[in-house]
Each structure stands twice: as C-alpha cells, then as structure tokens.
Image (spheres, rainbow, N blue to C red):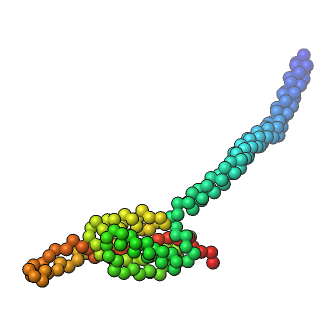
Amino acid sequence: MELANNKDTQRWLAVGLLGLVVLLVVLALVVPIISKGLELNETKENLAFTLKKYENILAGKGAIVSNIEAIKQQHQDQNYFNNQSTSALASAQMQEFIKQTIVQAGGQLSSTQVLPPNNEKDKFNRITVSVRMTGNIEVLRAVLYKLETSTPLMVIDQMDIRPMRSIRNPQTRQIQPSNDLNVNFQAIGFMRAQPQ
C-alpha cells in the first residue's frame, strides 16, 4: 500500500511539475505576447487620435487661409505704406504733404531734405525726410498731429525745438520776446520693398 501511495504521490508530483512547466511556458511566451498586443493597441489608439486631430486641423485649413487673405486685404486697405512705385516718388509725395501741412497750420517751412532710404530686412523701405520749420507752439502741435495721424503712416523722430532769438525794437530799443520756435525733425514713412 505504501508503494501504491508512493506511486500516486509521484504521479501527482509529476502532474504538478508538468502543470508548473506548462504555466511557466505560458507565462514566458503568452504574457509577453499579450503585453505587446496591449502596447500596440494603445499606440494604435494614440496614432488614431493624432490622425483625427490633424484631420480636424486640415478641415479648418480653408477657413484659416481665407482669414489670412482677409487680414492681408484689410492691411492693404489701411494704406499704412506709401504706394508709390519708387522711393524717390514716395519721398517727393512726403515732402509735398509736409509742406502743405506746415503752411496750412500757419508755420513757415525752412527746408526739407530727403535722407538715403533704409531697407529693413527686405520687407519695407524706410523713407526719411529731414524738416526745418518755424512757428509757434500751436502751429507745431497742429503740424505734429496732422503728420502722425496721416495715411500713409508717418512717424516723427529726432525732434529738436529751440526758441527763436528775440528781436530788438528799433524805435524803443527794447527786446521784444518771440513766441516762435525753430523746429527740426525727421518724418519717416514706409513703403513695401520692390521685388528685385
């Protein structure tokens, strides 16, 4: 009986060892395959989400392009840039506008001088006109307001304001104060760079 008991125990041990070996083989082979499958499934879902996101972006491409075109057209309509064909014509237009502005405000234009154009990173040309004028503070205010609110856009730079020398009255020999000012400044306008 002991021998039969011993054989039954050995059988159960053999069946247990066989089950353990099968379990180890399953764990060694099947679990990595299932794990890899789950990982690939997650990667697939991430790629599908990214693809959907890009499809949504591409679906809105037409609206974005039309918005960009509308913004470009609006920018063109604002006339911030001088639309003359050359910088010489643009500077002549600026000089004439400055002259009219000073005269209309009641000032006196002493001189204007066009400085060499400055190309800014191939996007636009900077046109600078050096201006000398005389007038009182109200004239100066009116001129600056008109120039800085004009279209095409003009920017005032490097302003120098000095009072005019007082003059002596020849009859009374008294010095008469003057409210007039000598004003020097640069008016800067912009135009799009011409294709080369």
Q: Is residue 50 depicted above or below 194 in this figure? A: above
Of residues 171 and 75, the one drawn nearer to the viewer in this rendering: 171
Q: Quadrant of residue 31?
A: top right
Instruction: Please provide percent x and percent y for residue 61.
Output: 69, 51
Q: Is residue 144 depicted above or below 7 in this figure? A: below
Q: In which quarter of the image is the C terminus?
A: bottom right
Q: Is residue 179 depicted above or below 78 in this figure? A: below
Instruction: Please provide percent x and percent y for residue 181.
Output: 26, 74
Q: Quadrant of the N terminus?
A: top right
Of residues 113 and 69, the one drawn nearer to the viewer in this rendering: 113
- Residue 110 placement, left or right of 6: left
Of residues 108 and 126, the one drawn nearer to the viewer in this rendering: 108
- Residue 79 placement, left or right of 48: left
User: Does the image show residue 118?
Assistant: no
Instruction: Please provide percent x and percent y for residue 60.
Output: 68, 48
Residue beneath the point at 34% across and 77% down: 109
User: Can you name the residue that lies furthest to the front here?
Assistant: 171
